[in-house]
Image (cartoon, rainbow, N blue to C red):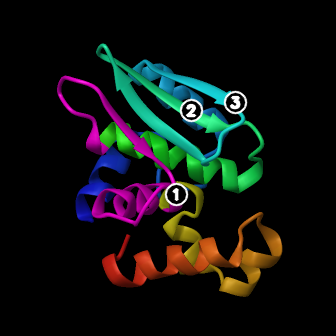
Amino acid sequence: MRFIDEKGRALRIGWGKRPLGEGDFERLCRRFRVNVTEMPLNSGGFYYRVKGRDHIAIDSRLTGTAKLKVQFHELAHFLFHAPESGATANFLSVGQKTRVEHEADAFALCAVIPRKWLEERSADEILQTEDISSEMLTERLGIFLTYGI
């Protein structure tokens, strides 16, 4: 998981230091020429590559941090799991959680819930002042305690 921290910091956008928002996601997608489409979906989102072009689809009904988590999760598939050539697709919440899905979740949670929050604030304070679900915070704390990121 250390490579996730290194890759996140290399983006030079504040990953892990501050909560990233939708504007950060859009800037990164523009920088890497990833096309983003929002539409009603049966899953939260998915990343796919076709004919050398990268795409992310996001469920248009998502809002707030739930949407941010999906956006950064799918961006992580592009950053970490895109093949050099050929077609690919990664779907959020389809089937069992693989290593690839755990990595994308870790990247997304670190983007939305920065390490600084975990070091300086109590879990109760974060839950009371931020638009973060207890499930997201619990998962993020697990990443922090296990991997130090």
Secondary element type, mark 2: strand
Image quadrant holding the N terminus, namely bottom left
Name the foreground residue: 82 vs 145.
82
User: In the rendering, at what x and y percent does residue 68 appear?
Assistant: 63, 48
16, above or below 90, in the image: below
Q: Which residues are magenta?
A: 80-109
Q: Amino acid at mark 1?
A: Ser
Q: Amino acid at mark 3?
A: Met
Name the foreground residue: 125 vs 47.
47
Image quadrant holding the C terminus, namely bottom left
- Tell me the CA gap for discs 3 and 2: 7 Å
Query: Counting residues from the N terminus, which is met first, the one under dot 1 or under dot 3?
Result: 3
User: In the rendering, at what x and y percent does residue 135 appear?
Assistant: 63, 76
Q: Which residue is mark 2?
A: 57
- Tell me the CA gap for discs 1 and 2: 13 Å
Secondary element type, mark 3: strand
Asked if disc 3 and disc 2 are in contact, CB closer than 8 Å, the reply is yes
- Residue visible at 60% across and 48% down in the picture: 43
On the question of residue 14 being in view, the answer is no
- Tell me how many marks there are: 3
- Residue visible at 52% across and 62% down in the picture: 109
Residue 93: give its label. Answer: 1
Q: Which residue is mark 3?
A: 39
Query: Counting residues from the N terminus, which is met first, the one under dot 1 or under dot 2?
Result: 2
User: In the rendering, at what x and y percent does residue 143 appear?
Assistant: 42, 75
